[in-house]
Image (spheres, rainbow, N blue to C red):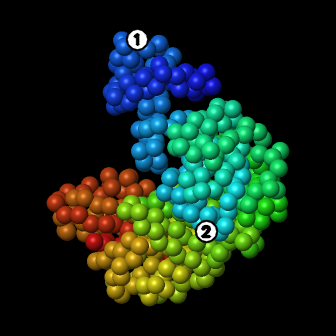
Amino acid sequence: MDLDRLAALRTPAGVSALAAAADLAGRDPLSAAGALRARGVPADLAAAALTQAELRRRAVGKFGPLAAHMFFTRAGLEQATRSAVAERRATRLRAAGVRTLADLGCGLGADAIAAARAGIRVHGVEADPVTAAIATANAEAAGVADLFTVERADATTVDVTGFDAVFCDPARRKSGTGRRVFDPAAYSPPWDFVMALAERVPRTVLKVAPGIDHALIPPGAEAEWVSVAREVVEAAIWCGPLAGTPRRATLLAAAGTTSDLAGTGDAAAPVGAVRRYLYDPDGAVVRAHLVAEFAATVDGTLADPTIAYVYADTAVATTYARCLEITDVLPFSLKRLRALLRERGVGRAEILKRGSALDPEQLRRDLRLAGTGSATVVLTRVAGAPTVLLCR
């Protein structure tokens, strides 16, 4: 995508090409391009329209119906916040009294659109000219152009002192290659700049990768890990007056319900024997170091202090973990496990693991499963020893 192609897609001819491309979604790319050209669409415009149609199709999971009217880049869509997560964050900002927000590195505008819809006036800053133009187009598509404006600039040069709050989502992909960046020092804007924002505007929120090192979280801030339908999608650092409990796991269910688990992140769960039920905590709970807080809700213990599986004597309904009933516990042995599964007639096995170096797909091939039954095989450690749990 470049500025000329974006401009072409926003003309009446481009809008028509986009509508035609949407109708061709799912077809072979070559035949779809041929079909568009047969309708008189120039080759360059046809290619751009088909690319946008595919990106819009992929974006529905993040943006819902609005995706059909937005513009995307591949890298921008991958980093964009899901609308449910952005809306929840915007609601929290609004409840904290935020009325004006500087969005540094606003990308395609996902978070800014949610904030504007919540009634917050947003000044977006984006260094990349194409991305900045797309954010402006998306603000118009969402009907919030009066509350969300975009400035093309280097975020480090923008004066943010007049805003109620700052939101910063530093780019985590290498410019020119699109490859992921895992070292915060290589973020854009730079990590030192990002960390200093709260000194300039106390109410600062930073979106970071879920794998962030806890040692990088500033003292006094709240670190929140968010999962959607049991998939960890992001982490956020809430600074100054916005900060709550030091660690938080926020779980958004597919049905739209939200659950929060909060704590200090430094508690230790009691350790004991394997019990009847195994709880597999949501990834956000694990990332937030809140396994001990979760274990307390089900009167649970760990069988190994380094493994985030929780064991209990009763099955308790919880949104924070998946519960499995353990039927068999045995030291890991491929031969013994294969024999047990054959004895039970297990032909379909879900394989979970924590604390095991085994490759689940290779193990599945080695087990040579046959039968009509199903089971869950858990590879883990108990008191440091490689162990297999057979569950249902």
- At x 23%, y 64%, the residue is 374
Drawn side of residue 368 relative to residue 203, left or right:
left
User: Callout 1: 10 Å neighbours few (<14), some, many (20+)?
Assistant: few
Q: Position of residue 123 (x, y in %)?
A: 70, 48
- At x 49%, y 79%, the residue is 294
Drawn side of residue 124 relative to residue 80, left or right:
right
Classify the position of the C terminus by image quarter: bottom left
Q: Position of residue 10 (x, y in %)?
A: 53, 26
Q: As drawn, which residue projects farthest toward the front?
A: 146
Amino acid carrying label 1: it is: Gly
Determine the image quadrant of residue 274: bottom left
Q: Secondary structure at mark 2?
A: helix
- At x 62%, y 64%, the residue is 94
How far apart in space, not on screen, are marks 2 and 1 (Cα)?
A: 51 Å
Residue behind mark 1: 40
Q: How many tags in the picture?
A: 2
Amino acid carrying label 2: it is: Ala
Dot 2 and dot 1 residues touching (CB under 8 Å): no
Q: Nearer the viewer, residue 74 or 369?
A: 74
- At x 31%, y 77%, the residue is 325
Q: Judge whether 296 appears above or below 173 on screen.
A: below
Earlier residue among tags 2 and 1: 1
Observer-side mark, 2 or 1, equals: 2
Visible residue check, residue 382: yes
Q: Which mark is residue 95?
A: 2
Q: Secondary structure at mark 1?
A: loop
